[in-house]
Image (spheres, helix red, strand yellow):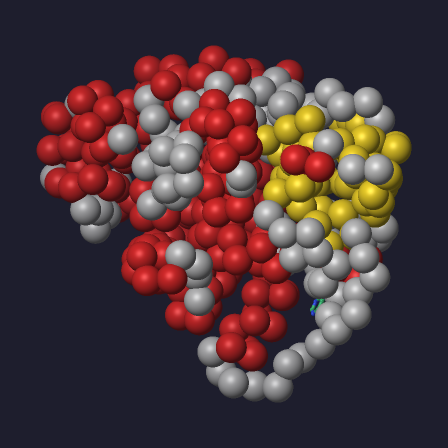
Amino acid sequence: MMNSVTDRVDRKAVRDLDQPNSRHIETITTDSPEQAEIRSLTRSMLDDHAPDEHVARLDESETFDEGFYARLGSAGLVGLGADGKGTDADPRHQVVVLEELGVGHTSMAVCLVVQYMGVRLLSHHGSDEHRERVLSPLVDGRNRVAFALSEAEGGTDIARAMRTKARKDGSDWVLNGRKTWISGAASAEHAIVLARTATATRSAIDGITMFLVPMRAHGVSVRGLDTVGIHGLDTCEVTLDDARVAPCAVLGEVGAGFRQVIGTLNGERLNAAAVALGIARGALRKAVDYAAQREAFDRSIGSFQVLQHSLADGAVKVEAARGLLNRAAEAAHIESLASGAGSGTSETLSAMAKLAASEAATTVTDVGMRVMGGAGYSREYPMQRYFRDARLYTFAPLTDEMLRNFVGERWLDLPRSY
Ligand SMILES: Cc1cc2nc3c(=O)[nH]c(=O)nc-3n(C[C@H](O)[C@H](O)[C@H](O)COP(=O)(O)OP(=O)(O)OC[C@H]3O[C@@H](n4cnc5c(N)ncnc54)[C@H](O)[C@@H]3O)c2cc1C
């Protein structure tokens, strides 16, 4: 894949990344040459095909950017090293794409977080048939998957709250239940659905199976939900009403689906952190630019210490989150080479990175709204979009409170708090 990305890279843009402009602290990175190429490619695609006005129109009209998604697919940025035959993508590359999309096209970044999750689950647990029929077109950006775990009764404690069930009928499986808050379900070809197939015995997470459900299967219906942010990607309720699927719809092992998903949640956390970091960076840049040109009392408002300090604190949060994200991605890469799955260190670092990035995003977008005064409240400017979109990663895919629980237990060796 690297060759196809390398071929498209604008060399000058890569050189520019090595020469950061001191006014734009957010461009200082510690990228490897491959990461720098991927960053440059993503940025140039955003510059060419997704300027601010375009993204604002999509947000306003609540429309998914099919054209840009197709471009990302043909540039190799949906697969990113995954070959469609079981080789997974490199987490260090995914976070770079997602950070840049978080800056310029947040809804597309959220869509890619889901697609990267789909690629990972299908690469690790898909049969040859799944890989050929679903994974291959997915890595080329020719189709999309949704990931359907959450239900109305509870997202955090979903294993206990899960009401969706699948039962055997002959050799087929029949699914009944309702999934909620499912990103991109209206336009995906398939959803990876978690359903209970047996009563939990030892642990609530046992007896749950992953199914690859065609969205056009009889008994599957989708209803759009009205949300505060991420308006460029649909968020849906998916109802399964006697939805019948063939035995080959089982993804991985019957009864072990939740454990299989847990094995990939580390990557999702890491990727969520990257999007939040991008949102924080994008909002910081807009706030600094506004503070530099807006005047009050015959001076630029950026010269008032109170605003400067808020922006400086935001910049520190952004760079601290970046540092954690880089360490977490590196650890995830090393662990994936060793064992094929994330383990202790990378999981805790990913939890910390996601916490740091979500705090950077909520802090910086709040500062941005303050710096811009009334203009921040106007839908003509992107700050309110960053402000709304940033909220998602305070609770998804796992809430910040649960990540703190995780850090307390795993890193600080404190008793489990719940
Ligand atoms: C726009 C959007 C897109 C989404 N996309 C998807 C998707 O594609 N697929 C999918 O499956 N889901 C998706 N979700 C769902 C998301 O993952 C859940 O909202 C999230 O897991 C939290 O679950 P919940 O909303 O049910 O909150 P709850 O689980 O009800 O939590 C409510 C509050 O209680 C706190 N809490 C719960 N337990 C504890 C504890 N032990 N200690 C401390 N605090 C605790 C939580 O931290 C939170 O503050 C999406 C949600 C949204 C809004």
Q: Nearer the viewer, residue 130 or 78?
A: 130
- Say left or right for 182 vs 286: right
Q: Nearer the viewer, residue 32 or 283?
A: 32
Quarter where residue 18 is shown: top left
- 27, above or below 70, in the image: below
Measured as percent of width and height from the top left, residue 299 is found at 33, 39
Looking at the rendering, in which quadrant would you find the N terminus?
top left
Measured as percent of width and height from the top left, residue 364 is found at 47, 49
> Looking at the image, how many numbered discs can be counted on the residues?
0
Outermost front residue: 170
Say which residue appears at 80% left-offset and 27% top-offset: 220
Say which residue appears at 12% left-offset and 39% top-offset: 19
Q: Nearer the viewer, residue 67 or 161?
A: 161
- 164, above or below 101, in the image: below
Is residue 190 visible in this depiction of the protein? yes
Say which residue appears at 71% left-offset and 63% top-offset: 205
Quarter where residue 326 is shown: bottom left
Looking at the rendering, in which quadrant would you find the C terminus?
bottom right
Measured as percent of width and height from the top left, residue 151 is found at 78, 47
Measured as percent of width and height from the top left, residue 206 is found at 72, 63
Say which residue appears at 47% left-offset and 13% top-offset: 67
Is residue 361 visible in this depiction of the protein? no
- 30, above or below 187, in the image: below
- Say left or right for 146 vs 356: right
